[in-house]
């Protein structure tokens, strides 16, 4: 007979995974509490995932108080759906909803409350928390005038957070677009804002809670001082832990003034698990100036997910930012003519469990 808690099979209540899963196994997996003479791991090829207190998502299944040795707790097992990790599940550059249903399934969909799109979690997994990385759009580089080069666009802000899932809530993710580069003697356009929003009702916007990663600002044109665009910043990262728990956040790199490099931006790692798992990124480098004098277009600012575009050199347009959230380079001036700024890189959101 299986071991039960209040008449329910422990195996249907606990977080389990194949033995190859990176999360730490509870010793309950191979303990003397057996079914038909076999341990859980020997019988199924799976393991119970250990519970660790002190995390926003922590929830022990009840084994600590019911399965003891000499009157003391000997085991600890996480409740199902309360042990997120950094395994990739979904990524997009388009606005979407995370839909949690009463049957436990979790979907990423273009519309709210539908099982259309990408199923992130099964009913058996019954996910109650997810990690997500959110980045705004990079600012576009400015366009040059006939006498002055332009500044680079700013890099976008970035945030890595835990989100709470509930079937009765609406979970909306808006992804910022890339800022386009400015034409002749025109400022670059700002990168779009990315946001995660939790509404505590499916039917209206009452009780909404936000987490925002702003896009980078556009670089200024040659005729408008040629300054680089400011890097985006974050908002809502210090509150609303019932809905969001922010692990890391950073502002984007500032775009370079004409003749100057854009600033770099980096988040070395994210981890919020007992195993100290790391999601590591390369430093988002700022773009190089078109040349070493005030004649070159300014480099775009970096983001943790992309490198800023280089500023325009000899008779060149500014170059676009790469990856996600990086700013575009500014255009170089050309006598009696002008050059365009480079486009910023689009925003993005990635989901993990």
Image (cartoon, rainbow, N blue to C red):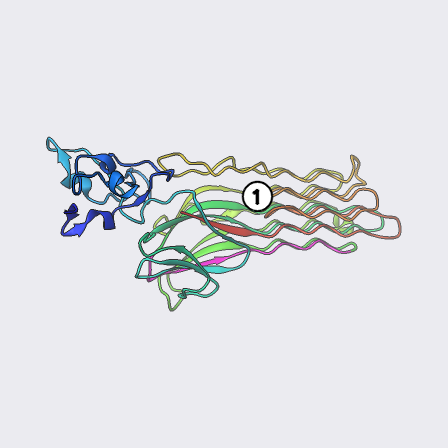
Q: Is residue 7 visible?
A: yes
Q: Which residue is mark 1?
A: 305
Identity of the residue furthest to the right in this view: 336
Horizontal side, residue 187 vs residue 69: left or right: right
Identity of the residue furthest to the bottom in this view: 203
Identity of the residue drawn at 56% across and 41% down: 304
Picture coordinates of residue 274 (x, y %)?
35, 35
Identity of the residue furthest to the top in this view: 70
Identity of the residue drawn at 60% across and 52% down: 346
Of 288 and 237, the residue lying toward us: 288
Of 6 and 35, the residue lying toward us: 35
Of 301 and 76, the residue lying toward us: 76
125 inside magenta stretch: no
Quarter of the image where one finds residue 169: bottom left
Quarter of the image where one finds residue 209: bottom left
Chief secondary structure of the magenta portion: loop
Horizontal side, residue 125 vs residue 214: left or right: left
Position of residue 106 relative to residue 299, above or below, is below
Identity of the residue drawn at 21% across and 38% down: 39
Horizontal side, residue 273 vs residue 293: left or right: left
Q: What's drawn in magenta, residue-wise?
A: 166-183
What count of labels does the image hold? Answer: 1
Counting other residues with Cα less than 10 Å from the Cα at mark 1, is it few (<14), some (14-19), or many (20 or more)? many
Of 13 and 223, the residue lying toward us: 13
């Amino acid at each position: 007979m299986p071991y039960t808690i209040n008449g329910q099979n422990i195996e249907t209540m606990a977080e389990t995974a194949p033995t190859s899963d990176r999360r730490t196994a509870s010793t309950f997996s191979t303990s003397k509490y057996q079914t038909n003479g076999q341990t859980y791991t020997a019988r199924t090829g799976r393991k119970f995932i250990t519970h660790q207190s002190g995390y926003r998502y922590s929830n022990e299944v009840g084994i600590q108080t019911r399965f003891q040795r000499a009157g003391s707790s000997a085991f600890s097992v996480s409740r199902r759906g309360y042990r997120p990790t950094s395994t990739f599940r979904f990524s997009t550059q388009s606005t979407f909803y995370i839909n949690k249903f009463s049957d436990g399934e979790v979907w990423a969909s273009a519309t709210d409350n539908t099982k259309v799109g990408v199923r992130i979690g099964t009913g058996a997994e019954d996910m109650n928390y997810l990690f997500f990385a959110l980045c705004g759009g990079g600012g576009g580089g400015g366009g040059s005038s006939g006498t002055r080069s332009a500044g680079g666009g700013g890099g976008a802000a970035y945030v890595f957070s835990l989100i709470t899932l509930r079937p009765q809530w609406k979970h909306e993710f808006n992804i910022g677009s890339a800022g386009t580069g400015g034409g002749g003697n025109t400022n670059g356009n700002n990168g779009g804002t990315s946001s995660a929003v939790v509404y505590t009702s499916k039917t209206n916007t009452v009780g909404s809670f936000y987490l925002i990663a702003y896009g980078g600002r556009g670089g200024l044109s040659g005729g408008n001082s040629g300054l680089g665009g400011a890097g985006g910043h974050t908002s809502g990262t210090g509150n609303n832990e019932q809905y969001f728990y922010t692990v890391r956040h950073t502002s984007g790199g500032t775009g370079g003034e004409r003749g100057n490099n854009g600033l770099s931006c980096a988040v070395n790692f994210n981890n919020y698990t007992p195993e100290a798992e790391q999601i590591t990124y390369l430093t988002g480098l700022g773009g190089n100036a078109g040349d070493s004098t005030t004649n070159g277009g300014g480099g775009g600012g970096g983001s943790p997910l992309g490198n800023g575009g280089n500023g325009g050199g000899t008779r060149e347009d500014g170059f676009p930012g790469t990856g996600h959230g990086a700013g575009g380079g500014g255009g170089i001036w050309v006598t009696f003519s002008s050059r365009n700024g480079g486009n910023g890189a689009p925003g993005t959101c990635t989901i993990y469990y």
